[in-house]
Image (spheres, helix red, strand yellow):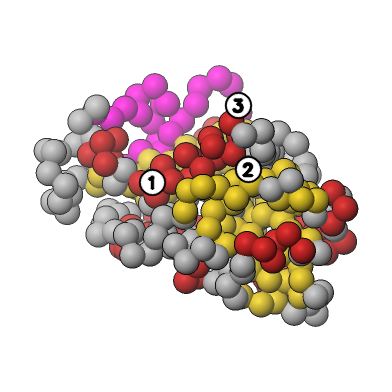
Amino acid sequence: MSGTREFIWLDGGLVPAGDARVSVKTHSLHYGTAVFEGIRGYYNSDQLFVFRLREHCERLIASGGMIHLDIPFSAGDIFRGVIELLRRNGFRRSVYIRPIAFVGEGDIRLDFRKHPKQVAIFAVPFDAYFERSGLRVCISSWRRVSQSSMIPRSKAAGNYLNSSVATIEAKLAGYDEALLLDEEGRVSEGPGQNLFMVSGGALVTPPVYSAILEGITRQTVITIAKESGREVQERPIDRSELYTAEEVFLTGTAAGIEAVLEIDGREVSGAQPGKVTKNLEASYSDIVTGRSTRHASWLTPVYETT
């Protein structure tokens, strides 16, 4: 960042980070009544490209609507707020961007519809989510939050307690990450990532009704794979299918595309990233950094060029 002063976008304007404060009586602090997005900005050749910013802003609004959280800004307002924030902070490296809409200070009642709603956006330097490339994962004893008890397709803060306990369980057992099953015992997703496997040459990923979040990176991978002529199947996946899959990888805004090399002590693809995974990762990397002009509309440049 330029200088040392960090700025946060809060309720429509930029404020110094130290002044971006909320009350301990904030409703979302107590009940998880918030929705958020994770967005990546990739720095390359003196330009910072924000990946699929419009889709992320639209999903934030949709997530709020699903849980009765009416966000007092439009997707366009948040889009412009992200760009304003990045320019003011002067980032000259890759970043992770976090817009969050939350229920503000009110009483202790669970019905928050009449409580004030707030929106904040911050960004931090960011390179890689996982500590190493190539993951050892395990099936969690915790099930993915059920569609009959919550709304998994809403990126709601409260849903992520489920993700946190699954992640901690996996790490305490010596693994890099967890995989969660849905209430029917089928494969759902990682705590913060969607899952793909290669089976019979086809790319297979769980459907929306397996309690997944409809990931923007997931949809990007599906598009890239279809363009390359690969068959893509969205269907239920049994746990045992993962043990015989040709390749397995995770996708997410923070994670990008990350190969899974071991599941429950069983090697995948000879404990090496497979050919399909590597090809998709290379194509994805070229697109998000602007090295490829393919899908240039997915990128929003932050800085004006002369």
Q: Nearer the viewer, mark 1 or mark 2?
A: 2
Visible residue check, residue 243:
yes
**Depth order, front residue of 28/238:** 238
Mark 1 or mark 3: name the one nearer the start of the chain: 3
Q: Residue at x 13, y 38 (%)?
A: 108
Residue, disc 1? 157
Visible residue check, residue 220:
no
Residue 29 lies in the magenta stretch: no
Q: Residue at x 75, y 79 (%)?
A: 231
The residues bearing labels 1 and 2 have C-alpha atoms spaced at a distance of 20 Å
Q: Nearer the viewer, mark 2 or mark 3?
A: 2
Q: Amino acid at mark 3?
A: Ser
Q: Amino acid at mark 2?
A: Glu
Tell me if residue 200 comes above or below residue 66 in the rendering: below
Q: Residue at x 20, y 31 (%)?
A: 25
Residue 177 is labelled as 2
Magenta part of the protein: which range? 1-23
Residue, disc 3? 2
